[in-house]
Image (cartoon, rainbow, N blue to C red):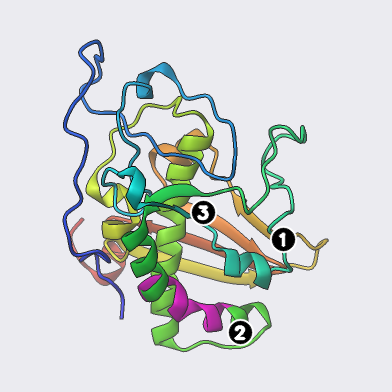
């Protein structure tokens, strides 16, 4: 059963309540901490943001409560053919700027990481494995897969912002984060296969500025399985005869 926008984590996260006196933005810029030993130079606007935000709930992270969250999980790396150490093709071919899939991770709360693993990740491992192998899934499993895709889409937008050094200044809301984004809006998934050369894992185009500001659609590739996933407010309302 979908989370339905009620939240994976029940506690309301703490957000940063102080801003540097010289900061002239009308909101506190979020800072998402990149893991994997990547060296990303942040824009001046976020350098005065005191604490990093959790990529899953949006709350501030204390050092002792930090772990790393992979928007595309490590079990998916293994399922796609042990691609953890493969370079991510969407980045520059310059190896100094081209991280591996394992390195694409952001700081999160330990509790959030554990709860998302239990409630969102674990229920979809078997169904995604079956889909990748050409098998079938049930309607309830599709619901769980859509929740998982919501998590990937929203957290990937935050990851794209962090990997770009937070150069695009955005005001994030509670539904910008997976915790309350999951199941909150209408959603559509299109699953199909391709016969071109094998790309074991891909996520398009999470570095695009349009996606960072409005992460409504994404394309996830696992071997020859393509998943186009779209979610937004009132996406299906007119189809069901509802006012928009």
SS at mark 1 in the image: loop
Looking at the image, tell me whether mark 2 or mark 3 is earlier in sequence order. Answer: 2
Residue position marked by numbered label 2 in the rendering = 130
Query: Dividing the image into 4 quarters, which one contains the N terminus?
Result: bottom left
Please state which of residues 34 and 233 is positioned toward the viewer in this rendering: 34
| Precedes in sequence: disc 2 or disc 1 | 1
Residue 116 vertical placement versus 143 (above, below): above
Q: Which residues are magenta?
A: 119-128
User: Badge 1 is on which residue?
Assistant: 83
How dense is the environment of label 1, judged by Cα within 10 Å: few (below 14), some, or many (20 and up)? some
In this view, the residue in front, 141 or 189, is 141
Of discs 2 and 1, which sits in the foreground? Answer: 1
Where is residue 34 shown, x and y percent of the image?
A: 50, 40
Q: Quadrant of residue 173?
A: top left
| SS at mark 2 in the image | helix
- Residue beneath the point at 33% across and 52% down: 65
Residue 19 appears anywhere in the view: yes
Whether 25 is among the magenta residues is no
**Which tag is nearer the camera, tag 2 or tag 3?**
2
Question: Quick check: is 127 in the magenta stretch?
Answer: yes
Tell me the distance, in whole angstroms, between the alpha carbons under discs 2 and 3: 21 Å
Quote the CA–CA distance across marks 1 and 3.
20 Å
Q: CA distance from mark 2 to mark 1?
A: 19 Å
Residue 185's spot in the image, x, y percent? Answer: 29, 61
């Amino acid at each position: 059963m979908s989370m339905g926008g009620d939240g994976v984590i029940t506690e309301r996260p703490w957000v940063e309540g102080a801003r540097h006196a010289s900061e002239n933005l009308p909101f506190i810029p979020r800072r998402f901490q990149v893991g994997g030993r990547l060296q990303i130079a942040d824009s001046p606007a976020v350098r005065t943001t005191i604490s990093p935000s959790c990529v899953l709930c949006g709350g501030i992270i204390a050092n002792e409560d930090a772990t790393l969250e992979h928007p595309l999980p490590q079990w998916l790396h293994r399922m796609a053919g042990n691609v953890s150490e493969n370079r991510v093709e969407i980045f520059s071919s310059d190896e100094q700027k081209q991280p591996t899939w394992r390195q694409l991770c952001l700081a999160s709360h330990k509790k959030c990481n554990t709860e998302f693993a239990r409630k969102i990740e674990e229920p979809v491992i078997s169904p995604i494995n079956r889909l990748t192998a050409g098998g079938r899934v049930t309607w309830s499993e599709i619901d769980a897969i859509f929740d998982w895709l919501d998590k990937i889409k929203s957290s990937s937008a935050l990851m794209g912002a962090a990997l770009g050094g937070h150069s695009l200044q955005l005001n994030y809301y509670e539904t910008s984060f997976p915790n309350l984004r999951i199941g909150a809006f209408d959603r559509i998934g299109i699953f199909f296969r391709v016969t071109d050369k094998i790309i074991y894992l891909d996520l398009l185009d999470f570095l695009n500025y349009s996606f960072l500001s409005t992460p409504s659609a994404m394309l996830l590739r696992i071997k020859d399985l393509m998943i186009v996933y779209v979610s937004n407010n009132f996406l299906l309302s007119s189809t069901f005869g509802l006012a928009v």
